[in-house]
Amino acid sequence: MVHLVTGLLLLPLALATVIDRRQASPSLNTLIQNAGKKFWGQCADEGRLTENSQNPAIYKANFGQVTPENSMKWDATEPSQGNFDFSGADWLVNWAVQNGKMIRGHNLVWHSQLPSWVCQITDKTALTNAMTNHINTFVSRYKGKMYAWDVVNEPFNEDGSLRQDCFYNVIGPDYIKIAFQAARAADPNAKLYVNDYNLDSATYSKTIGVVNQVKQWIAQGVPIDGIGASPSDYVAVTQACLNVPKCVGITSWGASDRGASNTPDLFDTNYNAKSAYYSVASLLAGNHSTSTTSASTASTPIATPTTPSSSSSPMQTHWGQCGGIGWTRATQCQSPYTCQALNAYYSQCL
């Protein structure tokens, strides 16, 4: 799993100008689609999209898919057995449909954020019935509206074995097969994914275990359409997605740094695009310009987004980008940090 200093009265106008300009130029979603992929998505829920005007403007301008942060998790949707609350999920689905965004359901079965009643069930048949009823009720409600579902989330240990959570311990490893079969029956056209983290390295034991297990499930007829991974380097994962034909898209987990405990996102606390955004946009635009396999669906040429003017200091701060293919801004780091190349497209002050 994957950033203006001005007078207070002038700030809303300045932000509106930046956002309007962003809306008028190719977005990350446009750029990645022109590179042959389906979407650049973003996590969202009602609170994030209604807390101010900047968040929905950025979402509408830049992202083509939304993934719910919490509104579709089990504790939010079935807090007590058989009693469903779809209010948060309905709001997000309606917003996405009204704004022409794809929706990735997240998630149906996960060891975390479960209401206490789920793991209090110790009978195999009873827990199987509770799980399949949850999946069928939820997936059927949004049939035809969801591009995809994360059916089972984070079921693997770091050594590649299956996590022994309450589903595994009571139902056994077949709970995953049962969950995917239930989801497919409820919406045959939705793509179904198993999702996990720490899958960045192809030689890591967890990655090897996940890939081998998913291949076995598919060979057994389990209807799994793909694996969702959770990497953390914007440029590296974008390049990897471009390099892998079966990569369908990228979803960022958080649009701006406002309210975040650190600064991991593509827009800063003032909703200005950060260097990571421009690096990714440049990479996608460059791939489109050299691609011979994906025809442009836009009526105007795709241009590399203009790099914002540099600040008064020529030095990048800790964690800032300082180099890479297409990088035209500061290449020196504030002491004691040095510019270190992480890959051909991205160097960082570390």
Image (cartoon, helix red, strand yellow):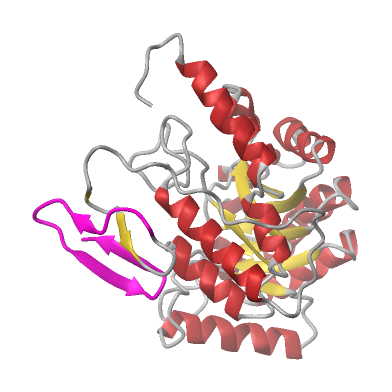
Quadrant that contains the C terminus: bottom left
Q: What is the x, y in percent for residue 36?
A: 73, 70
Q: Is residue 237 visible?
A: yes
Q: Residue at x 66, y 58 (%)?
A: 31
Q: Nearer the viewer, residue 183 or 89?
A: 89
Residue 299 as seen in the image, left or right of residue 116: right
| Residue 342 belongs to the span the image colors magenta | yes
The total of numbered circles placed on residues is 0
| Image-quadrant location for residue 82 | top right
Q: Is residue 154 visible?
A: no
Q: Residue furthest top?
A: 9
Q: Nearer the viewer, residue 227 or 297?
A: 297
Q: Residue at x 52, y 52 (%)?
A: 112
Residue 245 as seen in the image, left or right of residue 260: right
Q: Nearer the viewer, residue 248 or 142?
A: 248
Residue 250 as seen in the image, left or right of residue 236: right
Q: Residue at x 54, y 47 (%)?
A: 113
| Image-quadrant location for residue 309 | top left
Q: Vertically, is 24 above or below 214?
A: above
Q: What is the x, y in percent for residue 213?
A: 60, 85
Q: Vertically, is 334 above or below 198?
A: above
**In the image, which residues are magenta?**
328-350
Q: Nearer the viewer, residue 98 or 180?
A: 98
| Residue 343 belongs to the span the image colors magenta | yes
Q: What is the x, y in percent for residue 178?
A: 75, 70
Residue 74 as seen in the image, left or right of residue 82: left
Q: What is the x, y in percent for residue 124?
A: 68, 66
Q: Residue at x 72, y 57 (%)?
A: 301
